[in-house]
Image (cartoon, rainbow, N blue to C red):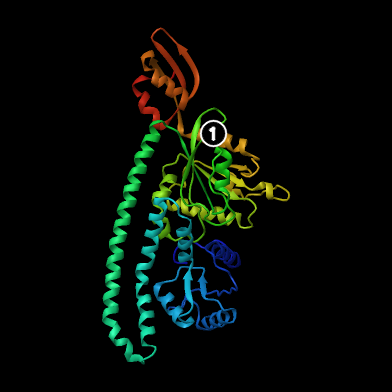
Amino acid sequence: MKRGRALLPVEDSLLELARLADTAGLEVVGQTYQRFDNPNPATYIGSGKVEEVKTLAEDLEADVILFDDELSPRHQRELEKQFGENRKVLDRTALILDIFAQHAETHAGKLQVELAQLEYRIPRLTRMWTHLARQAGSGGGSGASIGLRGPGEKQIELDRRMIGVRVAQLKKEIEQLQTRRRLHRAKRQQTELQTVAIVGYTNAGKSTLINRLAGADVLSADMLFATLDPTTRRVDLPGGREVLFTDTVGFIQKLPTDIVAAFRATLEEITEADIILHVADATHPNMLQQIEAVEDTLAELEVENLPTVLALNKIDALADGKIELPAQYTDRAVVAISGFTGQGIPQLLHAIEAATEHYMDAITVFLPYKRGDLVSLFHERGQVESEDHTGEGVRIFGRMPKRLLPYFEKFQEQAA
C-alpha cells in the first residue's frame, strides 16, 4: 500500500470499507477483490479484473466504484475511462475525506478537512478537464476536442493557482489556530492540570467513555468518525487531584499521511498530553489489529513512548466477559471497562492516577508563610507526604509534577 499499513485481512478490510460507505450515505450492492504483488501501471487492477468489475457494476446498476486503497490520479483517470462517464471511481482516501467533511462541525475541523480535500484534488484536476473534452468531442469526431486543448490546459493552470492560493490561506489560518491553541495550553499548564489524551480506533467508544467520566454530552453513535473535533473535560482522580481528559479524532488502518498532516492542529492535543488513554473495542474480532493501527499513528506523531493505559471497552457486550491479550501487552496497565455501564471505571481511574506519578519527582521544600500561593499549589497539584510547620514557614516533603519544579527551585532543600 502506498500510504498507511494494511493490518486487516482483505475480507475484513472490505467490511470496514462498506461501513465507511454506509457512514458516507452510500448503499453497497456488491464487492470483489484481487490479490497482486504490484499494481497494474495503467489501471491498478488487472485488465481482466477491470472487465469483471465493469460487468458487475452494469448488472448491479452501480454508479460509484470504491477502491480500498489510495489510487494515483493516473489510475483513477484510466479506470473512469474504462468504466464509463456515468460511473464515479472513488478511493479510500476520498471516502474518508467525504465523511470528515460531513462530520466536521467546528471552524477548526472544517478548515482542516478543506485543506486535506484540496491537497488531494490538486493532482487530479486534469481528470475533470479530460471528461469535458470527451463530452464536447462526442458529437463531432476526434477533431472536435482540438479546440479545447488550449483553454483546458489554461483552465487547469488557473484552477491550480486558485487552489494554491486557497491552500496557502488555509495553512495560514490553521497556523493561527495552532498558535491560539498553544497559548491556551500554556495557560492551562500554568494551572498544571495534567492532560490525558483519549485515543483509539474509530468507533471504539471514546466519546461514550468521556461522557461517563465527566458527565459530558459528546455525540456518541454507532458509526465511524462520529466525532472529529477535540473535546476537553475535567475529571477528578480517586486521590482528589483533577486532570483534563481530551477526546480526539478516531484512527483507522491505512490512514493516509495527508490526512494526519492536515489534522495535525487537532492531533497536537495528543502530542502535548502527559498520558495516553488508548481505548480499544474488546468486542471487535480484529481488536489486536486495531490496537496496532492506533500505535502506528502514535509512532508517526512521535508520542509512542508516553505512559499509556490500555482500556478494553465494551466488556458489557462480551458473552463470557473474558479477554486474552498476547504477551506484548502485559507490560502496560490494561483495564477492562464499559463506558456504557460504568463497569471498571474506578479501576481505570486508579490506573491513570498511577501513571501520572511517572511525571512526578520527590521534592522537599521550605516555604515561608508569605508564599501561601506555593503552599496551595503543592497541595492542589502535588502529593504531600509530610508537612512540618515552624515559626518562619512550612517544610513539605512530597512529589511534584516535573513541569512545576521550577516554581519551587529556590525553596528546595536536599533530602536527608
Point out residue 393 in the picture as x, y percentages from the top left corner: 40, 12
| Farthest top residue in view | 391
Q: Can see residue 341?
A: yes
**Residue at 61% from the left image edge and 47% from the top image edge:** 312
**Residue at 66% from the left image edge and 42% from the top image edge:** 341
Is 292 rendered above or below residue 34? above
Point out residue 173 in the picture as x, y percentages from the top left corner: 32, 52
User: As rendered, which of 191 and 305 lies closer to the eye?
Assistant: 191
Q: Residue 155 is drawn in which quadrant?
A: bottom left
Q: Which residue is mark 1?
A: 353
Element under disc 1: helix
Q: Can see residue 413?
A: no
Badge 1: residue crowd in 10 Å (few <14, some 14–19, many ≥20): many
User: As rendered, which of 165 and 325 lies closer to the eye?
Assistant: 165
Kind of residue indicated by mark 1: Glu
**Residue at 46% from the left image edge and 64% from the top image edge:** 93
Left or right: where 133 falls relative to 39:
left
**Residue at 35% from the left image edge and 82% from the top image edge:** 133
Q: Residue 180 is drawn in which quadrant?
A: top left
Point out residue 177 in the picture as x, y percentages from the top left corner: 35, 47
Is 334 rendered above or below residue 50? above
